[in-house]
Amino acid sequence: MIIDMHSHILPGLDDGAEDWDEFSAMAAIAVSEGITHMVCTPHFISYEEEFSPDSYKLLLDEARINLASRGINLKLISGCEVFFTSDLELCLQERKIITLNDSGRYLLVEFSRLDVPASTKDVFFSLKLKGITPIIAHPERNIVFAQRPELLKELIEHGALCQLNTGSLTGMFGEYTKGAAEYLLKSQMIHILGSDAHSSGGRAPKFQKALHLIEKLVGPKMLTEITGDNPLKILNGEEVEPYPVKLSMKRKSFFIEKIIKKITIKLPVSFR
C-alpha cells in the first residue's frame, strides 16, 4: 500500500488538473507508480470564496465513478490543502474546509514559501485543543524552516506533523530544496509523503524514484511508516507517534549556507 497524501488531481478546482482527460492521465500515472490511495487536496484560502465543501464532495464522487468506468484501480480520499491564516479555527467551525478523510482529526496546512507567521504556534495549539492535528505541507520548501529547522522541531514537539513532497527529494524544485528534504528526513521530521501532483507532465504523481532515495537515506522501516503506516493511521483518525527529532549539529550544511547567502528572512517575533 502506498498512500499519496497530497495531490491536486480533481479537475477544475484550482491550479491542478484542467479537465477529466488530465485527471485520468494523472490517475493512470499514479497507479503505474504503485500508488494505491490518493488524497485529493485542492487549495483553500479563507479570503477567496472558491472552495465549496458540498461542490467538492459531488466532484469527488464523480471522479470515483470516472475511475471505475475506466478500470483504474485508485482509491480517492477527501481533504484539502489550507493556506495558513489566523482564522483557521473559525473556518473549521463554519465547515468551510475538509479535514483529511473528513475525519475531523488531521488538517493539511500550507505556508507561504517565505514566511512562518508569528501566530502559528497559538493557532496550532488551539487546533490541538480541539483534537485536530495540523500537518505542515512541504516544509522543505519554506525558507524560514530551512534557515531555522529548530522552529519546525518546536512545532512538531507541540503536536504538528510534516508532509514531504516527493518531487522535492528528486530535485524538481532545485538543489536547495532537495538538500532541505534530505536534512528533514535524516532529522526524523517527516511523517508522510505526497506527490503534490498538479498535472500529468512536469508535476505528475511520481513516487518510485523518491522511495528509493528515502530507503537509502533513512532505511526501509521509516520508508514503510511514512508511505503506509502513518498515512493509514491519519486517514483512520488514529494517533501518529512520530520519532524523536534529531537535529544535526551540522545543520548549516550546503543547502542552508547557500540559501542564507541568497536571501535573509526577518523571522516572526514569536520565533526569535
Image (cartoon, helix red, strand yellow):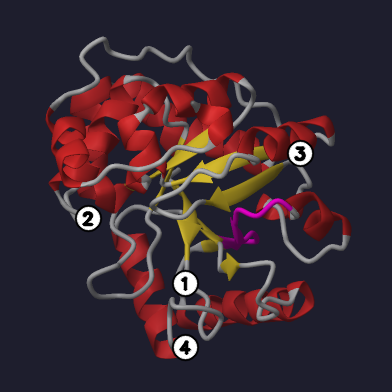
Instruction: For residue 237, say whether it is visible.
Output: no
* Residue visible at 65% across and 44% down in the picture: 235
Q: Amino acid at mark 4?
A: Trp
Q: Amino acid at mark 3?
A: Leu
Front position among marks 2 and 1? 2
Which residue was labeled with disc 3?
A: 127
Residue 77 at x, y = what percent?
61, 59
**Residue 83 among those drawn in magenta:** yes
Q: Do tag 2 and tag 3 residues touch (Cβ < 8 Å)?
A: no
Residue 256 located left or right of residue 190: left
Task: Give whichever of 144, 188 is nearer the camera.
Answer: 144
Q: Which is more N-terminal, label 3 or label 4?
A: 4
Instruction: Give the spatial CA distance, label 1 vs label 3.
Output: 27 Å
Look at the image and give the residue range highlighted in magenta: 76-86
Instruction: Give the spatial CA distance, label 4 vs label 2.
Output: 27 Å
* Residue visible at 48% across and 55% down in the picture: 6
Q: Do tag 4 and tag 3 residues touch (Cβ < 8 Å)?
A: no
Instruction: Give the spatial CA distance, label 4 vs label 3.
Output: 35 Å
Task: Give whichever of 95, 155 is nearer the camera.
Answer: 155
On screen, residue 174 above or below 55: above
